[in-house]
Amino acid sequence: MSVRISVVIPNHNGSATIGTCLQSLFSSRYPAFEVVVVDDCSSDSSVDIIRSFPCRLIRLDRHTGASQARNAGARDSSGAALLFIDADCVVQEDTLARAAEAFLKSPDCVIGGSYAPVAYDDGFYSTFQSVFINYSELKNREPDYIASHAMVIGKEVFVKNGGFPEAFMPILEDVAFSHRLKRNGVRLLMDSSILVRHIFNFDLRGSLQNAMKKSKYWTGYSLQNSDITRDSGTASHELKINAASACLFLFFLLCFMTFRESFFLLSAAIIGMTNLVLNRKLIQAFFRVKGRSFGIRATLYYCLIYPWAVIAGGVSGTLLYVQSRRAAL
C-alpha cells in the first residue's frame, strides 16, 4: 500500500542548490509523488533550473518568505501527505518511501525527520553542524517541534491547523507551527529513518554566523513564550549548559590569572569536566560519525569556540526582546 506524497519546496535565489535537490528527488525509487516548488520571487537563475525538471512551479510575484511559499505549495498540492524540505536539502533514495511508511502508520500525527549525520558538502564545519542537528532533533521520540527541512504531515491536518504562520520572524516558523499543533492536540513524532543531506557550505565564519542568528531568534522567541529553559531540539539543554559552562570557565580562569589561587584553576577544571560529562552523548556522536580526529576537533570547537557565538546571539535576542517589550508599553 502506498500514499501519494506532495514534496513542497520553497525557493528563493537557490540556484546553487535547487538543481541538486530536485535531481535527488527524481532519482527516488518511490512511485507515487509530485514535487511542488514555490519560487519566492527569485532574481537568480533558479527558475530556469526548476523548469528543467518535471515538477510543478508556482511563482510568487513578491518576496514574502518561506512560510507563505510553503503554504502556497500545500494549497496547490494533490497528495494526501505533504513532505516539506528545503531547496538546499538532498533526499536519499529511500527518503520518500520512509516518509510514506511513517505517514501510513500515524496519519493523524506530524512526523519529523532530520539531517543525515554527514553533510552533503562534507567539510568540517558543515558536518559538525549536521551531527549536532541530527543528534539534537532525534534524541527525543516526541519532540518539542519538528523542523520544516523534513516534515511529514497529512494535508487535511495541515489545512485544519492553519499552516505555517505567515506574519513571523525570519526563522522559527516551523517551531511556532509545531507549538500550535501541540496546543491543538496533534501528536509530534520523530522518525530517525527519514533523513535528508543538507548543503551547508560552511566555513568558520558561516558556522559562527549561523549559530548567532539561530540563538538570537531562539532567545527572543523563548523569552516571549516564557520557555527559555525548555529542551527544544537544537536549543537543547546540552547547548545551554555548554554556553553557561563557557562563561563560568572563563570567569574562573580570569580569576586564577588575577589572584593566582589554585582554587580558581581547580574550579575551571571542574566546570570543564562537568560540561564534557553532560554533553557526552553529543560528543560520542562526533566520534561515532567521523572518527577520532574529527571527534577531538569537533569537541574542542563545540566547547571552546561555538558557545561564544551562541552567547552573542542570546545577548542580541534578549536586547531585541527588551526593546520590543518597551515599545509595546
Image (cartoon, grey):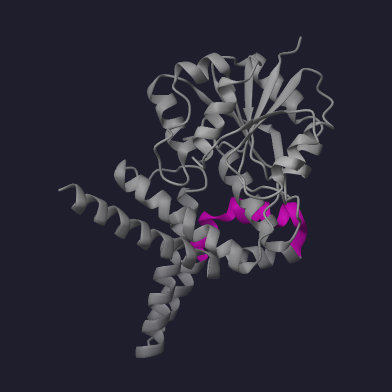
Residue furthest front as drawn: 61
- Residue in view at x 60 percent, y 16 percent: 106
How far from the left and from the top, in percent, is residue 12? Answer: 61, 45
Q: Give the position of the N terminus as an image quadrant.
A: top right
Say which of 221 and 296 sits in front.
Answer: 221
The correct choice, above or below, for 85 with respect to 290 in the image is above
Residue sitting at x 30%, y 60%: 319
Residue found farthest to the top: 1
Answer above or below: position of 279 versus 138. Answer: below
Q: Magenta span covers which residues? A: 273-292
33 sits to left or right of 153: right
Q: In this image, 42 relative to 1: left or right?
A: left
Of helix, strand and loop, which mostly describes the magenta segment? helix
Residue 116 visible somewhere in the drawing: no
Q: Which of the 4 quarters of the picture holds residue 53?
A: top right
Q: Is residue 312 above or below residue 94?
A: below
Q: Residue at x 74, y 21 (%)?
A: 33
The foreground one among 290 and 149 is 149
